[in-house]
Amino acid sequence: MLRCPPRLLQPRRLRLGSPVSTMASTLPFLRPSAPAPLAASRRAARGGPAAVRVPCRSRVSAAGVSLGSEVAVGSDALFADYKPTTAFLFPGQGAQTVGMGAETVNVPAAAKLFDKANDILGYDLLDVCTNGPKEKLDSTVISQPAIYVTSLAAVEVLRARDGGQNVIDSVDVTCGLSLGEYSALAFAGAFSFEDGLKLVKLRGEAMQDASDAASSAMVSVIGLDSEKVQQLCDAANEEVDEKERVQIANFLCPGNYAVSGGVKGIEAVEAKAKSFKARMMVRLAVAGAFHTSFMQPAVSRLESVLAETEIKTPRIPVISNVDASPHSDPDTIKKILARQVTSPVQWESTVKTLMAKGLEKSYELGPGKVIAGILKRINKGANIENIGA
């Protein structure tokens, strides 16, 4: 989703009516429990692409597709009638923390993913994850690959536990928060672990470059519904130039929405928040205005790499951040991933839809417990377990 900058200052909470002091991410506001990991396919052990091994268990009504078989490529509506029961949920940027990945040294399949990552990235990713420094891990160009690899390593940690394979086999839908969508697609077999990491590496670099090209920022608005936040944005936009305008960038959960835009626009939002009765403002420690047009320079770079990447129809539904719907057509998935960096994250709609369709159990795979916190804010009775690595 959001978070992480080059020179990361610790987030700051803005008590309304008082000046901004420390920088703080919205993450501390979302925290319960959760679980998780995935494993590279057996091919990884033989040196081949580490595609994630997961049976096709989605309950779809598309004719000609049998459970346990490879899904047929064609219409983008293959998963239109999906009925979820068990979900794997993957975190986004901002979930990183020094010390993550430490458990992978005891799980060969998980450790193998970090070895592969080192070859692709050109540096020791596990060392940065476990030892920091925090400023380095928090940078966009490193945190994105770090979260992707650690999340998929968590699947392998789960697989190594008693009953872990049964849990993995029971998963019939997956999704991830912003960056986490790449982890979800890898888990669902849409692309290999290696190809996914190359995409994530480029994504982080392109988003950092786009952030460096313009003065922009993000702030979480705490305590207002989405309609009120939109009104707040509209009021702020009346006072700034068009290039400074703001918009809701992350629809996380009731009472927690992130706004992105030009620095002057963000400052206007902060100044007006009290009059809209927002409880708190949290300036996010990110490189720039993610999920807005400020990220447009990153789109063409993503499109070029995606055009050369082999993407297959996922074996289970993967819910998109752009429209809160699953997609089965590879070309459509490529277009969605390119659009994702400039489109608002529809996480609240995604979670509400999953629950309305009958979701019974969720696992959060990867660092942190942010997603579990969001689910509990949407539905206090949500059954979610954290699985780290």
Image (tube, grey):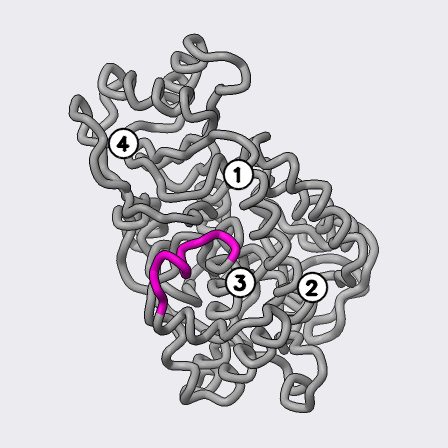
Residue, disc 2: 190
Q: Is residue 88 visible?
A: no
Mark 2 to mark 3 CA distance (whole Å)? 18 Å
| Residue behind mark 4 | 281
Q: Which is more toward the observer, 335 or 87? A: 335
Q: Mark 3: which amino acid? A: Pro
Q: Which mark is residue 145?
A: 3
Whole-angstrom CA distance, mark 4 to mark 3, is 28 Å
Judge whether 178 appears above or below 233 on screen: below
* Marks 1 and 3 close (CB-CB < 8 Å): no
Instruction: Tell me where the magenta segment starts and ends, as one range.
Output: 132-141
Residue located 63% across and 89% down the image: 45
Left or right of 18? Residue 315 is right
Q: State which mark lies toward you, 2 or 3.
A: 3
In the image, residue 147 sits, relative to residue 297, either above or below, namely below
The image quadrant of residue 49 is: bottom right
Q: Position of residue 380 (x, y in %)?
A: 28, 51
Q: Earlier in the sequence, mark 4 or mark 2?
A: 2
Q: Nearer the viewer, mark 1 or mark 3?
A: 1
Q: Secondary structure at mark 1?
A: helix
Amino acid type of disc 1?
Ser
Q: Position of residue 121 (x, y in %)?
A: 59, 68
- Identify the mark nearer the N-term, 2 or 3: 3
Q: Earlier in the sequence, mark 4 or mark 3?
A: 3
Residue 10 drawn at (x, y percent): 28, 47
Q: CA distance from mark 4 to mark 2?
A: 38 Å
Which of the labelled discs sits on residue 296, or is there none? none
